Structures are given as C-alpha cells and as structure tokens.
Amino acid sequence: GLKPDMACFNALLYACARTGDSAAAERWLSSMSADRVPPDLPSYNSVIQACSKASQPERAEEWLEDAESKGLHVGSQCYASLINAFAQEGRVEDAERTLTLMKSRLVAPDLACHHAILKACARTENPSRAMNWLQEMGSSADTSCFNSVIGMQSIAGNAGVARRLLSEMQRRGLEMNVRTYTSLAAGDERSGNAQAVAATFEGMEVAGIAWDNRAHALLISSYANSRNRDAAVAHFNTLEPSMKSDPLVAAAFQRASENESLAREAAE
C-alpha cells in the first residue's frame, strides 16, 4: 500500500506544532523512522516547537540535540521557542544557557529570542539581569525590548533608570507607544503616586500617543492605591461608556471604591 512521504509527515508535524500536541508530534517523528523516511530539519523544527508550546522544554531540548547529532542545525526560531518555554516557567538560568548555546553554534539570536529572554527576567523580577541583556543586544534592541526593561526598572523603584531608558529610545529614534508609557508608570501606580502617573500620561499625550484601556486603568488604580476615590471617580466619569465597561478599567474603578469603603470602616 501507499506510505506517507516526507511532505505528508511534515504536514502532520506542522499541525502538531501549531496546536502544541507534543505527544502526537513525537509519535509521528518516530513513525518516520519506522517507515524509513529520515526526518529532515522541518520535521525536527515542528516537534521542538510542539514540545516547547506544550511547556515541555526538556523534551524540546532533547529533540534539538538529537537533530544536532544528525548534522541538522536548527535555526533561531526553534531556539526562541525553547527559550520562551523556559521563560514561561521562570527558569531564567536555563533560558540564558540556551541563548549562550545557540551563539556558540553560530546561530544569531533574533528578536524573538531577545523578547523571550527578557520575559524570563520579568518572570523572576530581575531588572538588573534584564538591563545586562538589553545592553548586550546593542542596536538590535527594539521598542518591545525597551518597554520590557523600562517596566521592570519602574516596578523595582528605579524611576531614574527607567526614564534614562526612555531618553535612550528617543535618541535611537525608536517608536514609542502606549505600552512604553504604561511601563514607565507601573512603579508609581503600585506606590500610589498618582501625580507622577498623571504626569507620565501627560507626556504621552504631548508625544501624540492616545490613551488605551490599560493607561486609564493604571491611573485609576494609582488613585485607588492612594485612597483618592474622588479623583478615581472624576477620571472614570470622563470616559466613554465602552471604556467604562472595559474589564481592566472596571476592575480598577471597583477597587478604588472598595478601598474607600475600607478606609471609612477603619476610621470608624
């Protein structure tokens, strides 16, 4: 009878990679060998990505090494998937080890790898490590990279560092977006410094960047953290009905109302 060829197997493996079905991907890869169809680089790419998406970085790493042992050198996309899988689990050392490994194999990290390593730093709340990686990226760091590190520095209370990174973005001519400013405001929001949050978003408006739901929610949340319900209400009432019903905005406003009630109870 007819047997599946390379194209058939790779189509099946690609589907498994898309859905993160690692068990099926590994079965199909084993079937290829049984049917004397040697897996090629796309075959391994798919099974590595399927395992990574299924949060099985150890299995993904085993298949990556298996491919390398057969002289099939995987590209940055697979390494990025593996780094991202480690990042999701907050395993920053393993993510860094993988990035170092790919460099030793002369595979140049792409932006997906950089984004993934910074995600690992964020998961472990390690702004200094993220800063080191940002510096190592040099001119390849994009807006998303800067946004990530600005947010980590801001949350860590390093407002000066975060603002210097904003200035560096401007110097490089990188496009700033609303996330740049919400990242910058994140630390002040947590500490309840609503005045600083408002000033940050005023700067955003001057830069011609429109507010989104997260920006409105952050400002309202900063009022909640400073127990200033009146200011939260005043800002909430300026919003369009569709923005008021946004889950992030509504949750921030609800918390502002609850904090006010708790404050009254404590005073009584």
Image (tube, helix red, strand yellow):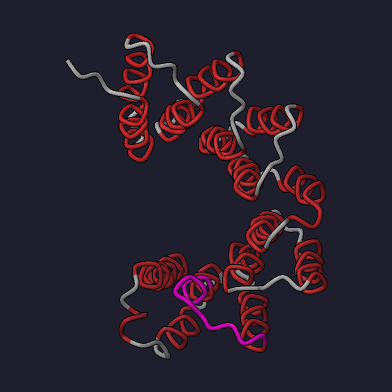
- Nearest the viewer among 136 and 181 is 136
- Nearest the viewer among 208 and 255 is 208
Q: Is residue 184 left or right of residue 106?
A: left
- From this viewpoint, which residue is outermost toward the front? 1
Quarter placement of the C terminus: bottom left
**Residue 200 sits in quarter:** bottom right
Examine the structure image and report whether residue 217 is included in the region drawn in magenta. yes
Determine whether 155 is above or below 217 in the image.
above
Q: Is residue 178 left or right of residue 214?
A: right
Q: Is residue 85 left or right of residue 94?
A: left
Q: Which residues are magenta?
A: 207-218
- Nearest the viewer among 105 and 228 is 105
- From this viewpoint, which residue is outermost toward the top? 34
Which residue lies at the image location 64% right of the left edge and 42% below the top edge? Answer: 117
Determine whether 51 is above or below 26 in the image.
below
Residue 113 coordinates in the image, percent (x, y): 63, 43
